[in-house]
Image: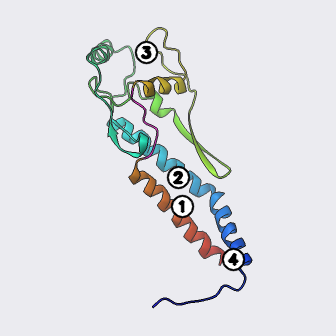
Amino acid sequence: MAKNFRIGNVNAVSNQIIKVFDTVKQQKKTLDEIGRFSRDRIVSEARKGFSLEQDKRNKFKPLKESTIRTRESLERNKRFDLDPDFFKATRANVTLTGQLLDAFLYRIGPGLVSFFFSEKPRRVIYEGDENKNDKVYDNLQGLGYGFIGLDERSQKRVVKIVIDEFRRTIKNLF
């Protein structure tokens, strides 16, 4: 049977709840854990050929035949350091050399985690391809190969990380 009780000083309780929220929101360790998990999940799934955009895990659309031929030519000519762990001429996984996914990073700020593409020098695949990493991603997204997002399973994991931190913070404050 449920137990009834009264809260004598609602303002004091409210202030303590706000204090817990503010404390958790500023925990760099928690934000770092969320950032690391999210970045690793996004990159890992993209390398496997899946996008986590739009809250679902979806397989990338197949490559066009002309793209496959171009990639096979690049592989034969050995002009570039193709990522041997993930590159396959017929696989749509946004990994040719691996540099775009390697450049996908996160940083933590006051109460938030932000994701960005570093501007490490890119290897030019063909003449005229001098775009920055964020522009390359925009182009991929326009072609239907966007990959930044978290599926429902990943979102639940992030929520669990936050709830665990709430529990630790409440335990330490009270």
Vertical arrangement, residue 32 with respect to residue 48, above or below: below
Q: Judge by depth and name the residue closer to the eye, 90 or 78.
A: 90
Q: Is residue 6 left or right of residue 103?
A: right
Q: Which residues are magenta?
A: 144-150
Disc 4/disc 3 C-alpha distance (Å):
60 Å
Tell me which label, 1 or 2, sits earlier in the chain. 2
Dot 1 lies on which element?
helix
Tell me which label, 4 or 1, sits earlier in the chain. 4
Tell me which label, 4 or 3, sits earlier in the chain. 4
Q: Quadrant of the N terminus?
A: bottom left
Q: Which mark is residue 125?
A: 3
Marks 4, 3: nearer the viewer: 4
Disc 1/disc 2 C-alpha distance (Å):
8 Å
Dot 4 lies on which element?
helix
**Residue position for label 4:** 13
Marks 2, 3: nearer the viewer: 2
